[in-house]
Image (cartoon, rainbow, N blue to C red):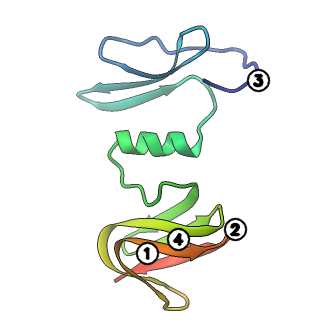
Amino acid sequence: WGPKTLIKPLFCVLPETGDRVLATFSDGSAALVVRTSTAGTDVFLAVPAVTPPLIRALARIARVHAYTEVDAGVWADGDLASVHVMSDGPLKITLPQGGKVSDLYSGRCFGNGPTVSIPSRKGETLLLRRE
């Protein structure tokens, strides 16, 4: 796991008892480790390769709400969510709470959440409101 480009200096994580090694380098050394303690959960990543799937996996580990399972930029606060769409097709959005989900600009209703499917196009930015 990791980039194809040689990175120097390269370091690895030295796992401790109880750590979860999620990825290793080709030599078997730890590249991605999750450590849980009384102070919280720490993630050690030995390469500069933070991808959207990795962020989603870490969010699941941290029990953070994920608005979508596909690549999209999401900024949310309260009853509003801005979503920048990265691919064509219906976008499935799951809000933290149920309610009517609509486009803030047009008023178009996409259904009652918490999960709705929204027709979208790559490069489009949606501004959603939950009522």
Q: Quadrant of residue 93?
A: bottom left
Q: Amino acid at mark 1?
A: Leu
Mark 2 neighbour density, 10 Å: few (under 14) some (14–19) many (20 or more): few
Q: CA distance from mark 2 to mark 1?
A: 19 Å
The tag on residue 5 is 3
Q: CA distance from mark 2 to mark 4?
A: 13 Å
For marks 2 and 1, the one nearer the N-term is 1
Q: Quadrant of residue 28?
A: top right
The reply to whether callout 3 and callout 2 are in contact (CB within 8 Å) is no
What residue sits right under mark 2 in the picture? Answer: 123
User: Of 10 and 97, which appears nearest the observer?
Assistant: 97
What residue sits right under mark 4 in the picture? Answer: 82
| Residue at screen point 36% across, 39% down | 61
For marks 2 and 4, the one nearer the N-term is 4
* Location of residue 17 in the rendering, given as x and y in whole percent from the top left corner: 31, 11
Q: Amino acid at mark 3?
A: Thr
Residue 131 sits above or below residue 37 on the image: below
Q: Amino acid at mark 4?
A: Ser
| Residue at screen point 44% across, 41% down | 57
Residue that lies at the very extreme toward the left in this rendered image:
38
What residue sits right under mark 1 in the picture? Answer: 80
Q: Secondary structure at mark 3?
A: loop
| Residue at screen point 32% across, 46% down | 63
Residue that lies at the very extreme toward the front in this rendered image:
89
The reply to whether callout 4 and callout 3 are in contact (CB within 8 Å) is no
For marks 4 and 3, the one nearer the N-term is 3
| Residue at screen point 58% across, 54% down | 71
Q: CA distance from mark 4 to mark 3?
A: 35 Å
Mark 4 neighbour density, 10 Å: few (under 14) some (14–19) many (20 or more): some
Q: CA distance from mark 4 to mark 1?
A: 7 Å
